[in-house]
Image: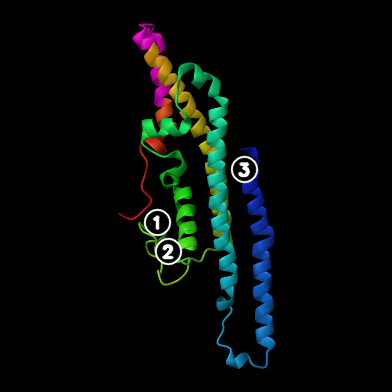
Amino acid sequence: MVKTNADLNSLQGLFLNYYIPAANKSIVESWSQISKSTYKHLLNLTKDDLKDNLYETIRLGYVGLFHKYEAYLKALVKATDFLLQEINDMSDLLSIKDYCKKEFGIDIYKSHHHFYITSRISYISNCIKHYDSHPIKKPIHQDFINSDKSKKIEISKECFKADIEDMKKHCELLLSQIMIIGFKQILDHEFYKSKDENLLNNDIKEKYLKAFGNFQLVLSDFIRPKSYFSS
């Protein structure tokens, strides 16, 4: 899990410090050569035409970013299952994946549409891989409803950087959420076990209910997910 988180930082460094600057350098050099060319009057090119190499580099960055996120999520779920394995085995509890399916009706590995940033990154990545980079995959993400569908997705370096930072923040939040999902199942089990055995007094019951209320707040993305796509 730590390695996967480091992979996000590595991808960020590679694209922002090497690949994108290299693409920008290529644009400058190509434009300089065209400007000095004897045949420049025959070339129907503008500087913006040369930017496709930059945008293609950034688009590939989004594909890599989503793959890193998928790896992070799998590693996080696996690590949480391992951490809680002894308790879960003793109480015959479910894995994180199975509990999410039972409690929230979701496949945790396909939960990216429950969050704004992961729904955005996933949408961009899928459009790049399956629709030649055009924002036409349906349902259309809210960020691309008004985009020109005849043009490929074009995202600036600054926007790409902001999306990476938002993804890193989301991964930190997800770490807390997945751990809480694991502890929620344990607390659910203990609550109903105590209730069945008539071991709940008002003080203990109040503490349980307060904890459940906190869980509801932190896990609202799973319990009451928003839609980030056109209907």
The residue at the point 43 percent across, 32 percent down is: 98
Q: Quadrant of residue 51?
A: bottom right
Residue 82 in the figure: left or right of residue 114? right
Q: Please give the residue where the numbered disc 2 appears in the rendered image.
A: 135
Separation of disc 3 and disc 2 at Cα? 28 Å
The span from disc 3 to disc 1 (Cα, nearest Å) is 27 Å
- Give the labeled residue for mark 1: 141
Q: Nearer the viewer, mark 3 or mark 2?
A: 3
Which callout, 3 or 2, points at the residue further toward the start of the chain? 3
As for residue 176 lying within the magenta part, the answer is: no
Which SS does the magenta portion mostly show? Answer: helix
Mark earlier in primary sequence (1, 2): 2
Report the span colored magenta.
Answer: 194-213
For image coordinates 54% across by 40% down, the residue present is: 74
Q: Which residue is mark 3?
A: 4
User: Which residue: 56% across, 67% down?
Assistant: 55
Is there CB contact under 8 Å for labels 3 and 2?
no
Q: Foreground residue, 17 or 136?
A: 136
Amino acid type at mark 2: Pro
Amino acid type of the residue tagged 3 in the rendering: Thr
Q: Position of residue 168 (x, y in %)?
A: 57, 45
Q: Are marks 1 and 2 in contact (CB under 8 Å)?
A: yes
